[in-house]
């Protein structure tokens, strides 16, 4: 989320001087037609979240307002820089980088994102700060370290009042969000069905959050576990994370949005949160902008990895959308409970999780009773990502499948030592990967 608000965060020394169209909408979306009518798979939007940390101690620094001011040249919650843009998030130590103009050419985004990260780090250097990747800070204690962004619309304050946002699920989460457009109800139904089937597999390649408050959590995707339970007071807001099967916008609004709004109304009688972005499922339709937003991807160590993972997801979703393996009705018949069970397994074990639902595997074009999630990805990429169009991202995915997702590589680098010094050394190396644009081995 991003707020259109005057920034009110930590007062810090000024940072270095400052030198369209978007899938993003303000927190107060207007009623009416979507801002776009982009056909499915004609363009994409990526959003990458990073934490601001001290360059020496790696402790979180709540200076997003100062960083945005340095990039824009004035106080703002959003800084547009060419085709890209930066914006605030709920916590004052987190910023989001996105392509402000939807693009059909994903392969160009990694370089553009990388250049912006270098510039942001340059602006942060005078106050001894930098950007840190991965989906969770490894030792942040959000109950005592969180500072929330303040906005005149009271959105963040309302979230905090209802849910208590000084927690990992709200204040210590950094994701890669992928926006896929749809132009009409037919495209929405097909895209929603295809996306729904891919969601349980995403932690297998994207998990990057194995450490929580200085300890190995036992989960490779602790961010998703925190997000899965953050709205427990209003369970219909998150559901089972995997969205229910729907066949139209009207059905989605009646079956998912209306019960969600009714559930939260006693906590929010003014309707401050009564908007489609309240929905906390792993993929949500943003009808105001004609796109489905996939939220289950952890941010990686550098944009090269993020964009490659996004391209892999697009390739598989498109094959399902085109009904290459199974018809739409068969995809929609896979139960939410079954998909949720598989998601819990990949949250824990990522690519080593066992996928043992034969009907689900058949829907993915795999003739087997059971296999590991990593092997499901190998089969899908062999079927969906051949030729020159995939040449730029397949090597990165091959590395992830060979060496494990980033969470597995982080634990391997720890070597069994979860002490603060070793944690600091590993996450310092990850900061360098982000600054230099290289993957972590």
Image (spheres, grey):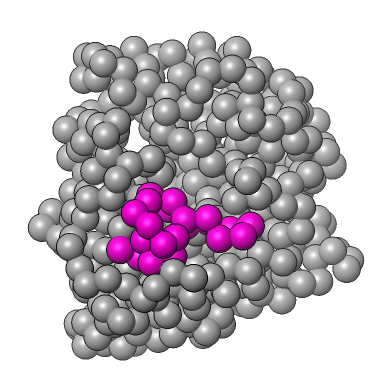
Give the magenta part as a residue range.
66-87
Q: Nearer the viewer, residue 141 or 200?
A: 141
Residue positioned 56% across, 82% down in the render: 438
- Figure quadrant of residue 238: top left
Residue positioned 42% across, 28% down in the render: 28
Residue positioned 60% across, 36% down in the render: 292
Q: Is residue 17 above or below residue 263?
A: below
* Residue 361 shown left or right of residue 129 in the figure: right
Q: Tell me residue 143's x, y (percent).
A: 13, 54
Q: Tell me residue 179's x, y (percent).
A: 61, 44
Is residue 73 part of the magenta span, yes or no?
A: yes
Task: Residue at the far left: name it.
Answer: 144
Q: Is residue 125 above or below residue 173?
A: below
* Residue 248 shown left or right of residue 225 in the figure: right
Is residue 91 part of the magenta span, yes or no?
A: no
Q: Nearer the viewer, residue 133 or 9?
A: 9
Q: Nearer the viewer, residue 345 or 315?
A: 315
* Residue 385 shown left or right of residue 233 in the figure: right
Camera sees residue 102:
yes
Q: Tell me residue 420's x, y (percent).
A: 19, 82
Q: Is residue 108 above or below residue 143?
A: below
- Figure quadrant of residue 374: bottom right
Camera sees residue 375:
no
Residue positioned 21% across, 82% down in the render: 57
């Amino acid at each position: 989320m991003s707020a259109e608000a005057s920034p009110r965060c930590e007062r810090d020394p000024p940072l270095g001087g400052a030198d369209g169209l978007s899938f993003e909408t303000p927190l107060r979306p207007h009623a009416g037609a979507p801002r776009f009518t982009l056909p499915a798979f004609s363009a994409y939007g990526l959003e990458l979240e990073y934490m601001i940390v001290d360059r020496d101690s790696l402790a979180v620094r709540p200076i997003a307002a100062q960083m945005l001011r340095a990039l824009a040249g004035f106080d703002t919650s959003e800084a547009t820089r060419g085709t890209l843009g930066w914006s605030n998030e709920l916590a004052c130590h987190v910023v989001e980088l996105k392509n402000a103009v939807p693009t059909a050419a994903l392969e160009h985004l990694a370089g553009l994102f990388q250049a912006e990260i270098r510039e942001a780090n340059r602006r942060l250097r005078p106050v001894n700060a930098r950007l840190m990747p991965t989906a969770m800070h490894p030792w942040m204690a959000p109950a005592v370290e969180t500072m929330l962004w303040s906005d005149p619309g009271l959105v963040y304050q309302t979230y905090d009042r209802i849910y208590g946002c000084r927690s990992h699920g709200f204040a210590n989460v950094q994701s890669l969000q992928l926006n896929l457009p749809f132009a009409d109800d037919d495209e929405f139904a097909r895209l929603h069905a295809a996306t729904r089937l891919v969601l349980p597999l995403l932690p297998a390649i994207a998990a990057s959050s194995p450490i929580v408050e200085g300890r190995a959590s036992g989960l490779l995707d602790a961010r998703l576990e925190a997000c899965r339970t953050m709205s427990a007071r209003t369970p219909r807001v998150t559901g089972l994370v995997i969205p229910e099967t729907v066949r139209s916008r009207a059905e989605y609004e009646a079956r998912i949005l209306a019960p969600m709004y009714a559930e939260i109304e006693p906590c929010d009688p003014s309707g401050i949160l009564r908007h489609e972005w309240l929905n906390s499922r792993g993929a949500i339709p943003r009808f105001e902008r004609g796109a489905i937003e996939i939220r289950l991807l952890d941010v990686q160590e550098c944009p090269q990895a993020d964009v490659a993972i996004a391209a892999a997801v697009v390739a598989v979703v498109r094959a399902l959308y085109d009904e290459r393996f199974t018809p739409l009705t068969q995809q929609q018949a896979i139960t939410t409970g079954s998909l949720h069970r598989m998601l819990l397994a990949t949250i824990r074990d990522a690519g080593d999780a066992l996928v043992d639902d034969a009907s689900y595997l058949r829907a993915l074009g795999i003739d087997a009773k059971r296999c590991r999630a990593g092997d499901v990805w190998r089969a899908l990429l062999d079927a969906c990502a051949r030729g020159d169009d995939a040449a730029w991202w397949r090597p990165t995915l091959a590395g992830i499948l060979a060496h494990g997702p980033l969470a597995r590589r982080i634990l391997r680098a720890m070597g069994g030592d979860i002490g603060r010094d070793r944690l600091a050394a590993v996450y310092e190396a990850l900061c360098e990967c982000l600054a230099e644009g290289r993957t972590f081995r």
